[in-house]
Image (cartoon, rainbow, N blue to C red):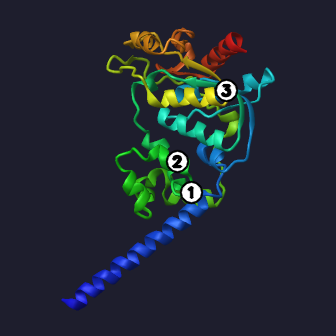
C-alpha cells in the first residue's frame, strides 16, 4: 500500500511538472506571434497611429470597408471580430491604450451585443495565452466563474480551449503561418451567396452594458472621439423595435439599422455583403468624416 501511494504521488508530481513545461512552451510560442489574428497582432505590437479604429463583432468586421477610409486619407484598421462580444472589444481597446496607440476616432458597433455581458469563448480564449503576463487581461477575466482554474491550473486553458489555442493553433503560430484575418485592413467581405434572410431578435433585450461603459470611459480618459453605431439588418427581421429600445438606454448611439435596404445588399439577414458594406461605409464617411 505504501509503495502504491509513493508511486501515485510521483506520478502526480511528474504530471504536474509536464503540464508546467507544456504551459511554458505554448505560452512562449504565443508571445512571439503577431500574424495569426487581431488579438496577437495587438498584444505583441509596438505603438501604432490610427485616425480610425473599428471595434465590434462580425457586424463590424463585415460592414466597415477599411479601404474606403484609407482612400479618404484616414489611416484605419477594422478590429471587429466575428463572434465577439463587448467583453472582448473592451479588453482589446485596453491593450491598445496600454501599448500607447494614438487613436483619433473609434467606431464601435453596439447593437445586438448590448444584450449581454458574457464573454465569447471562441474569441476571449485567444487572450488566455497571455493571462499570466498581462495584468490587464488577468483583471478583465478576474470575475469570470472559471478564473481560478484558468489562472492557477497549468495548461488547463490550452486543454479547455483546444479548438482555438490548442496544439494546431500553437503549431501554426510557431511556424508563423499567416491567416487572411489581417488582410484588407481587417475588413472581411462577404459574398452574394444568400444565407438566412429571415431573423428573429424578439428575445433579445438591450441592457445597461458595463463593457460599453468601459469603452466610453477609456475613450473619454484618452481624448478619443467615440462614434457608436447600430449597423443594418434586413427588413425581414422580427423584433426591429430592439434598436429603439437600445436608443432609449443609450441615446448617443447612432441607429443605422435601416440605412441599407434591399436583399441584394445582404449576405444574410444580419450581415451585409461586399456591395452593401461599401454602401454603408460611404454613408458613415459622409456623416462623420
Choose between 25 and 13: the one closer to the eye: 13
Label count reads: 3
> Residue 145 location in percent, x, y?
34, 46
Classed neighbour count for the residue bearing mark 3: other residues with Cα under 10 Å, few (<14), some (14–19), many (≥20): some
Choose between 223 and 19: the one closer to the eye: 223
Q: Residue furthest left?
A: 1
Disc 1 + disc 2, Cβ < 8 Å: yes
Left or right? Give the position of 94 relative to 76.
Answer: left
Q: In the rendered image, which quarter is residue 7 located in?
A: bottom left
Vertical placement of residue 23 versus 42, above or below = below
> Residue 84 location in percent, x, y?
49, 35
Kindly report the distance in space between the C-alpha atoms of the residues bearing marks 1 and 2: 8 Å
Kindly report the distance in space between the C-alpha atoms of the residues bearing marks 2 and 3: 22 Å
Disc 2 + disc 3, Cβ < 8 Å: no
Vertical placement of residue 171 versus 196, above or below = below
Choose between 112 and 116: the one closer to the eye: 116
Q: Residue furthest front?
A: 221
- Which mark sits nearer the N-terminus, 2 or 3? 2
Q: Is residue 191 visible?
A: no
- The numbered mark at residue 137 is 2
Quadrant of the snapshot with the N terminus: bottom left
- Which residue is identified by label 1? 133
> Residue 212 location in percent, x, y?
50, 27
Q: Residue at x 43, y 57 (%)?
A: 151
Q: Residue at x 36, y 20 (%)?
A: 205
Classed neighbour count for the residue bearing mark 1: other residues with Cα under 10 Å, few (<14), some (14–19), many (≥20): few
Q: Residue furthest right?
A: 73
Left or right? Give the position of 110 relative to 280.
Answer: left
Amino acid at each position: 500500500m505504501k509503495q502504491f501511494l509513493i508511486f501515485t504521488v510521483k506520478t502526480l508530481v511528474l504530471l504536474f511538472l509536464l503540464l508546467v513545461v507544456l504551459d511554458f512552451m505554448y505560452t512562449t510560442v504565443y508571445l512571439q506571434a503577431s500574424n495569426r489574428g487581431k488579438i496577437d497582432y495587438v498584444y505583441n505590437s509596438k505603438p501604432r497611429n490610427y485616425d480610425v479604429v473599428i471595434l465590434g463583432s462580425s457586424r463590424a468586421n463585415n460592414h466597415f470597408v477599411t479601404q474606403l477610409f484609407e482612400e479618404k486619407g484616414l489611416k484605419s484598421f477594422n478590429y471587429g471580430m466575428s463572434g465577439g462580444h463587448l467583453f472582448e472589444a473592451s479588453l482589446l481597446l485596453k491593450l491598445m491604450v496600454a501599448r500607447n496607440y494614438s487613436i483619433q476616432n473609434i467606431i464601435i458597433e453596439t447593437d445586438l451585443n448590448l444584450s449581454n455581458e458574457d464573454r465569447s469563448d471562441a474569441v476571449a480564449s485567444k487572450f488566455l495565452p497571455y493571462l499570466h503576463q498581462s495584468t490587464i487581461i488577468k483583471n478583465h477575466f478576474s470575475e469570470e466563474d472559471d478564473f481560478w482554474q484558468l489562472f492557477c491550473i497549468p495548461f488547463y486553458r490550452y486543454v479547455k480551449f483546444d479548438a482555438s489555442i490548442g496544439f494546431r493553433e500553437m503549431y501554426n503560430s510557431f511556424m508563423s503561418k499567416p491567416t487572411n484575418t489581417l488582410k484588407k485592413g481587417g475588413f472581411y467581405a462577404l459574398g452574394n451567396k444568400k444565407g438566412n434572410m429571415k431573423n428573429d431578435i424578439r428575445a433579445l433585450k438591450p441592457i445597461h452594458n458595463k463593457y460599453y461603459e468601459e469603452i466610453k470611459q477609456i475613450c473619454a480618459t484618452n481624448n478619443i472621439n467615440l462614434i457608436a453605431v447600430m449597423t443594418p439588418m434586413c427588413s425581414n427581421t422580427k423584433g426591429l423595435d430592439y434598436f429603439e429600445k437600445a436608443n432609449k438606454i443609450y441615446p448617443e448611439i447612432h441607429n443605422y439599422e435601416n440605412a441599407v435596404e434591399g436583399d441584394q445588399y445582404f449576405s444574410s439577414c444580419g450581415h451585409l455583403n461586399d456591395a452593401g458594406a461599401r454602401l454603408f461605409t460611404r454613408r458613415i464617411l459622409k456623416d462623420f468624416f
